[in-house]
Amino acid sequence: MVAAESGLARIEVPAGGPAWRREARERAAARYRELGVPTTRQEEWRFTNLAPLAPIALAPARPADPRAPRTLLDLAPPAEGPRLVFANGRYRADLSSTGALPRGAVLASLGQALEASPELVRAHLGRLARAEAHPFVALNTALGEDGAFLHLPPGAEVGDPIQVVWITDAPGASAAAHPRLLVVAGEGARATVAEIFVGRADEAYLTNAVAEVSLADGARVEHYRLQDEAPGAFHLGSTHVEEGAEARFSSHQLALGSALARSEVRARLSGERGEIALTGLYMASGRQHLDNLSLVEHAMPGCTTTENYKGILDGHARGVFAGRIRVLPGAQKTNAYQQNSNLLLSEDAVVDTMPQLEIFADDVKCGHGGTVGQLDENALFYLRSRGLAPEMARSLLIYAFAAEMVDLVRPAALRTRVRDLVAARLPAGARLREAA
């Protein structure tokens, strides 16, 4: 990696907090200065050029106007349960509600948790998302103002989906926000967590988000990530997961906004008979660039990974999917499969798809596939012959391709919001939503 030369290089670590966190910040800042911004010469970044970040003076986002987040909150789906809201990386208690939680469960801002349960946070913060291994995790660790914290004791179950809304609002100046999510699920605990990323439409800014999800034996966590940032935004997000025996983690990555975005999932199955399910939908037009990376490591026998991402690209947009499943020695009886399907709607749209397997065990069932195609002219002709206008015929076929991913969103309000966002990007989206 090369030394950072953009506004991202000017790191001033926030003051305050416990001594151990200040030390972690300083170490992370030093590590980021050492690693710098990744370049296309590195394998994991060879299809995503971060040079457009260089000329932007990404100063730390200042506290938002107290009134502005209320307006931007309308861009998020209605809350169906507990909700934490953050504006420019800072907790907004006036817009948040934790609701009723099981006995012993904690849902709070990271700042609150550091005051109430510092040792619990210290034991888990940075354990999975390691600053020394990833430049943007280091940057987040060094500069993050606040974050969301969810701790579920053994057997606890939160029935309603927990929503965490990250709002960026920085009129008049480019800004950088560094959200952090930490989820610790005890044995047999269950929860659904939905992260929503939105921002003001007329400014360039960076969201550099990190999530850590730790699942003990038998825990179940369903994680949604809706990236609907402003058209001029840059979004870099990574989710780091480790699960124990018979645990299950499912991730739904929905990338629709920003000028350039990258979503990463890095997961490790550390207990027998664990399961991971990763799905994603990315839709890009104009000159958008949407990158998706997944790295899943099977360390124990009898585990399962299923992965299915879909991309829809129009204009001069570019999509990237790089997925790797690694089966370590001794991880026998592994079942793992990757699929990436892409629909190109223009001659200038580009997609790079790289599903990969690394297998070091001999008793496994693994496979992968990738497809790139265009709309079926015969299907278009059939719909036209039934009286549909060209725009409606195209919209129906595109939505049919995306519908599998949309229907996997279980929380009703979030599913409705995703459906509306997908429809809005279609030629006859307004009429399609009315028909639905």
Image (spheres, grey):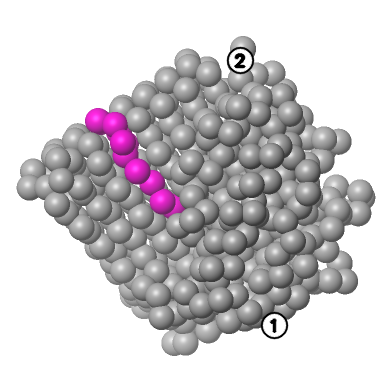
- Callout 2, which amino acid? Gly
The outermost residue toward the top is 103
Tell me where residue 109 appears, x and y as whole percent: 71, 35
Residue kind at label 1, given as amino acid type:
Pro
Q: Name which quarter of the figure residue 315 lies in.
A: bottom right
Q: Which residue is mark 1?
A: 55
Q: Is residue 364 left or right of residue 128?
A: left
Position above or below: 277 against 343: above
Residue 27, how many percent across, how many down? 59, 54
Q: Which residue is mark 2?
A: 104
Secondary structure beneath dot 2 equals loop
Asked where in the image residue 302 lies, by quadrant, the reply is top left
The outermost residue toward the left is: 362
Circle 1 — which element?
loop
In depth, the one of 301 and 372 nearer the eye is 301
Report the front residue among 252 and 37.
37
Q: Is residue 255 magenta?
A: no
* 90 shown above or below 261: above
> For this view, does 73 lie left or right of residue 228?
right
Magenta residues?
265-275
Q: Percent x, y for residue 430? A: 66, 62
Image coordinates of residue 162 in percent, x first then y, are 62, 33
Observer able to see residue 241: yes
- Report if residue 285 is visible in the image: no
Q: Which mark is residue 403?
A: none
Q: Residue at x 53, y 84 (%)?
A: 316
In depth, the one of 313 and 144 nearer the eye is 144
CB contact under 8 Å: marks 2 and 1:
no
Asked if residue 267 lies in the magenta stretch, the reply is yes
**Neighbours of disc 2 within 10 Å: few (<14), some (14-19), many (20+):** few
- Identified at 18% across, 41% down, the residue is 331
Residue at the spot x=58%, y=81% of the render? Answer: 51
